[in-house]
Amino acid sequence: MSWTDERVELLKKLWTDGLSASQIAAELGGITRNAVIGKVHRLGLSGRAKAVAPAAKPRRARTPTPQTPAATPRPAQAPAAQSRGATALKMDPVEDVAVEVAPEAAPVAEIVPMTERATILTLTERTCKWPIGDPSSQDFYFCGRHSDPGVPYCAHHCRIAYQPVNDRRRDKDKKQLARA
DNA sequence: CCCTGATTCGC
DNA sequence: GCGAATCAGG
């Protein structure tokens, strides 16, 4: 894949929206998070809303200068993009909406251990995105259990989501028959 | 382990 | 310019 204008625009939008590099990579498709990060830096829009980095961390990557005959200046990159607004807190508009509403009844569809639950902020390519509970409730969350990369749901919810309609009906019928 | 962004450097 | 490899950190 190449960086077409459309893809660059989408990248800018998603990045400024606060999505992580890997999330953006998944959104764009056919690209890794490294590519996204690299592009973000080249575009000069790194360091989004974030508390002002206090003591600069002396970044050093890879083996300390392996082959350097005599001259490899590498201006250590101009400290250009250090200008940021005061201290904008990163927030996700989606969660904002989901949290604003009344806390009333929270019909939990099933139990998922607290430690495995996911919010819209913690979902990744490998977390189950099965929604649980009332979306307008405080207790709404996503399954969050492990799912294979690129697969939206964990094995358990995959079975539910992708179960053929006929099978489901068959199950339902079985239950009704058993009851009758 | 999972993940995050930052950086370097061969291509 | 691109992005894998690597780093430092949560």
Image: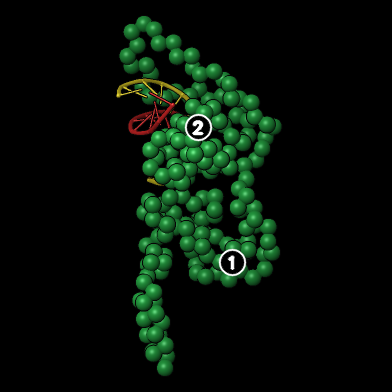
Chain colours: A green, B yellow, C red
Mark 1 touches mark 2? (CB < 8 Å) = no
Location of residue A72 with respect to A57 vertically, above or below: above
Label 1 and label 2 in one chain: yes
Instruction: Give the Cα separation between the discs numbered 1 and 2.
Output: 36 Å
At horizontal 62% and vertical 42% (from top left) the residue drawn is A90
At horizontal 40% and vertical 11% (from top left) the residue drawn is A72
Residue A58 placement (x, y as % from top left): 50, 22
Q: Amino acid at mark 1?
A: Asp
Residue A32 placement (x, y as % from top left): 40, 39
Determine if residue A91 is in view: yes
Q: Find disc 2 in the rendering and name its residue.
A: A40
Q: Earlier in the sequence, mark 1 or mark 2?
A: 2
Quadrant the C terminus of chain A occupies: bottom left
Q: Local crowd at mark 2 within 10 Å, few (<14), some, or many (≥20)?
A: some
Q: Amino acid at mark 2?
A: Val
Q: Secondary structure at mark 2?
A: helix
Determine if residue A156 is in view: no
Location of residue A149 with respect to A4 vertically, above or below: below
The residue nearer to you, when weighing A21 against A105, is A21
Q: Secondary structure at mark 1?
A: loop
Location of residue A81 with respect to A20 vertically, above or below: above
At horizontal 39% and vertical 74% (from top left) the residue drawn is A165
Q: Local crowd at mark 1 within 10 Å, few (<14), some, or many (≥20)?
A: some
Chain of the residue displaying label 2:
A
Q: Find disc 1 in the rendering and name its residue.
A: A134
At horizontal 54% and vertical 53% (from top left) the residue drawn is A120
Residue A141 placement (x, y as % from top left): 54, 60
